[in-house]
Amino acid sequence: MFGGGSNYNTRANFNRSERGERGSERGSFREGRGGGRGSFREVRGGGRGSFREGRGGGRAHEGSDQLVFIVNGELITTVWKKKLLKTPWHQNDVRIFISSALVATDSQKAGELVTELGNDRGLERLREIMNFPMSCDAGLDDRKLSFQYVILPFLGLLTKTDITKCILKYVDTIFMLIYKNLDSFFHKKVMKMLETLVSRNSIVDNNVDVDKLFKTEQYSFIPPSLGIFFLIIVRLLTELLRRIKEASTNETMHNIVHYLKDLTAKYKRSLERPLISRDPLIDNLETRKYFFAILDNEMNIMIEMLNTEHISETSN
């Protein structure tokens, strides 16, 4: 699997390279105390399931359960309730709120979370997250949210199976809010940040290393590869298309999908140039092929949903 095992925490040892570069994603892995850090070496199995169903067929893998999670986070299962009421919010408040919410969904306690997020106070906090300034180099700045370490887990939270499969009416309210901010949040922020990381061939935040981040908040999620970002984004867009009929004819949605296709192609090319890219997918050709088989399959399903619904609308 892509996210790491369920019986231990792993974190990256971001050593300086011979050139003195900080934060190489291809550093070694060592056991940590909290948070979540994955290794692509476990892509085929492990205690939390696998991606075998991603091979072939016309079915997308559901949810982010194997991609974004906090291990050994029992102590923060209910912290999200307190953070929801706190004001003002700073970056670390949002980070721990999301980490706690991830633990809650993995503990089969998503119902209460969905109910609270779907009421007026919860929706206002979701708007606040989407309206926050965003940066790939947010560091520990209180006034900005890290794209890698806060926004990605937020997108992963929205695609957790216990949320997308929840039958409470509040789920539709939450996804409609995301949809209404498709341009301001997703197109102009999320996709721009993804483009920045693809251009850099790196997911490192230049203003904070992972060791310092864990010292500040040990229950932080650290993505192992840029590939995680693509899978989470595709799955969230697919969920919006599945839930909201008008999404298939939304010009911004079409622009985002086109944008995503271009960035996927650039990401693939970067992995063929190991002297430039430091992504761990470079290390194993078989794993890389397997990953892109999953991503391409899910991209095709998303595009088919977009085109099919669009044709249906225009023919009526």
Image (cartoon, helix red, strand yellow):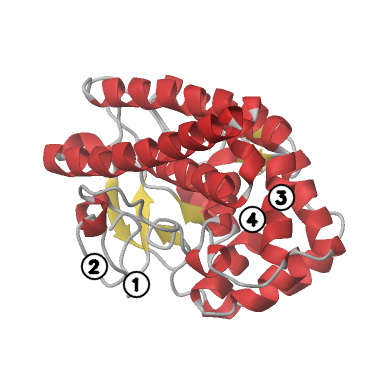
Name above or below for residue 84 compared with residue 133. Answer: below
Residue at point 43%, 68% (across, down): 33
Q: Horizontal placement of 285 versus 281: left or right?
A: left
Instruction: For the N terminus, give its image quadrant.
Output: bottom left
Q: According to the image, label 3 marks what residue?
A: 176
Q: Earlier in the sequence, mark 1 or mark 4?
A: 1
Report the amino acid beneath label 3. Met
For the point 69% across and 36% down, the residue is 185
Whole-Å distance between the Cαs marked 3 and 4?
23 Å
Extreme residue toward the front, this view: 316
Amino acid type assigned to the residue bearing label 2 in the image? Gly
| Residue bearing the label numbered 4 | 95
Image vertical order of residue 179 relative to residue 1, above or below: above
How far is disc 3 from disc 1 in space, using C-alphas? 32 Å
Place of residue 122 in the rendered image (x, y in percent of width and height, measured from the top left): 79, 62
Q: Is residue 151 above or below residue 248?
A: below
Work out whether mark 4 precedes mark 2 in sequence or the reverse, and give the earlier one: 2
Say which residue appears at 73% left-offset and 72% top-offset: 115
Tell me which numbered mark, 2 or 1, is placed earlier along the sequence: 1
Q: Which residue is disc 1 drawn over?
A: 6
Dot 2: few (<14), some (14–19), or many (≥20) neighbours within 10 Å? some
Q: Nearer the viewer, residue 188 or 56?
A: 56
Q: CA distance from mark 4 to mark 2?
A: 27 Å
Structural distance between the alpha carbons of marks 1 and 4 = 21 Å
Q: Residue 5 appears in which quarter of the rendering?
A: bottom left
| Quadrant position of residue 180 | top right
Per the rendering, the mark at residue 46 is 2
Whole-angstrom CA distance, mark 2 to mark 1, is 8 Å
Please, what is the three-letter code of the amino acid marked with disc 4? Arg
